[in-house]
Image (spheres, rainbow, N blue to C red):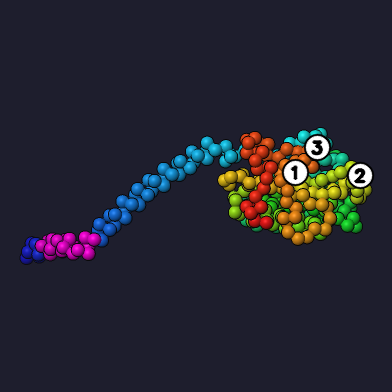
Amino acid sequence: MIQSKKKRISRTLKRKKKRVWKSPFDIMCFFFFLFIGIILFFYQRLSVRQTERDVLSLIKDQSYQVYSGLEIPEFLSKYPEQIIFHIGYTVSYNEEWRLPNWVAYELIRSEIQGKEKSAGIFSFDPDMKGISATNKDYLHSGYDKGHLAPVADMKWNAIAMRESFYFSNICPQHPKLNRRCWKDLEEKIRDWVIADSAIVIVCGPLVEEGAKVIGNNRVTVPQGFFKVLLSPYVSPPQAVGFIFKNEASMGSLRKYVVTVDSVETVTSMNFFKQLPDKLENKIESQFDISYWRL
């Protein structure tokens, strides 16, 4: 009895199996999915090969190398300076001016998504030697304590945030520059970082002979400010400069755009010197206003 049932079940299964292949629709489905599987297999192989070619191309193309210290400029004239390396930025401090000569750092996409909050306490840089500005120097001076490396770029780390309030990162800045175009540019840079993955930033004061000073510590008031930017990981790399007078500013940032070469002329600095000369000369002598979307 049991054997008879098993035979009937076996014959039924065989008939079902045979019926699977008798349906034209089933046969079409089988070959369709087989065809799709073959395409996906070869597409994956091609994608892997293309990725390998892209990686090899990036390695061969010097414009995509990650250059150590790319953000650090070189002085072409002698200036008093102390180079101080902080977590979020590097500063060249000028004790004679009580100001930074320049502040430099690379800002990457993940850093602008930080959640650290600012305590807003300005303080002496413990790594700095010599005289520093103080809060009293700025009191009733008519100038803001203007950050060169902005607080919003340092939200990724509590120490970086605290160090951004060191006076070695601060300059006397006209309130209507600090709170308008300078701030607008800082916000633009964060947008560019999201789009490009990273931006190298160098900025600092422009100081001429006979500059005004404020406070008991005789903190120099710059006549202007510069900022140069490099987007090194796009193809082709892009660079642009900005020069602002230390006065009320308004309107489009286009008014303040210059080539990096122009900034090098007024600062006696050499920016992005680690780049191959041919690439450096090209991107520093021109800028693509449409690329920077200004």
x and y percentages locating residue 252 in the rendered image: 73, 59
Q: Nearer the viewer, mark 1 or mark 2?
A: 1
How far is the residue under mark 3 from the one under mark 2?
Answer: 20 Å
- Tell me if 157 is positioned left or right of 6 in this view: right
Tag in front: 3 or 1:
1
Q: What residue type is labelled 2?
A: Gly
Residue 4 visible somewhere in the drawing: yes
* Local crowd size for mark 1, using a 10 Å CA cut-off: few (<14), some (14–19), many (≥20): some
Q: Is the magenta stretch mostly helix, strand or loop?
A: helix
In percent of width and height, residue 250 lies at 78, 60
Q: What residue type is labelled 1?
A: Ser
Q: Which residue is drawn at 62% across and 39% down?
A: 279
Which portion, as a residue range, is magenta? Answer: 9-28
Relative vertical location of residue 47 with respect to residue 188 in this rendering, above or below: above
**What secondary structure is marked by label 1?**
helix
- Is residue 53 within the magenta segment? no
Q: Residues within 10 Å of mark 3 (few under 14, many from 20)?
A: some
Residue 206 quadrant: top right
Upstream in sequence: badge 3 or badge 2: 3
In the image, taking residue 35 as reference, residue 204 lies left or right, namely: right
Residue type, numbered disc 3: Glu
> Residue shown at 12%/63% (left/top)?
15
Image quarter where the C terminus lies is bottom right
Local SS, label 3:
loop
Q: Is residue 23 above or below residue 77?
A: below
Q: Which of marks 1 and 2 is nearer the N terminus?
A: 2
Residue that mark 2 sits on: 210
Q: In the image, what residue occupies the spot 91% across and 44% down? A: 210
The residue that disc 3 covers is 81
Corner quadrant of residue 64: top right
Residue at 45% x, 41% y is: 52
Mark 1, residue position: 262
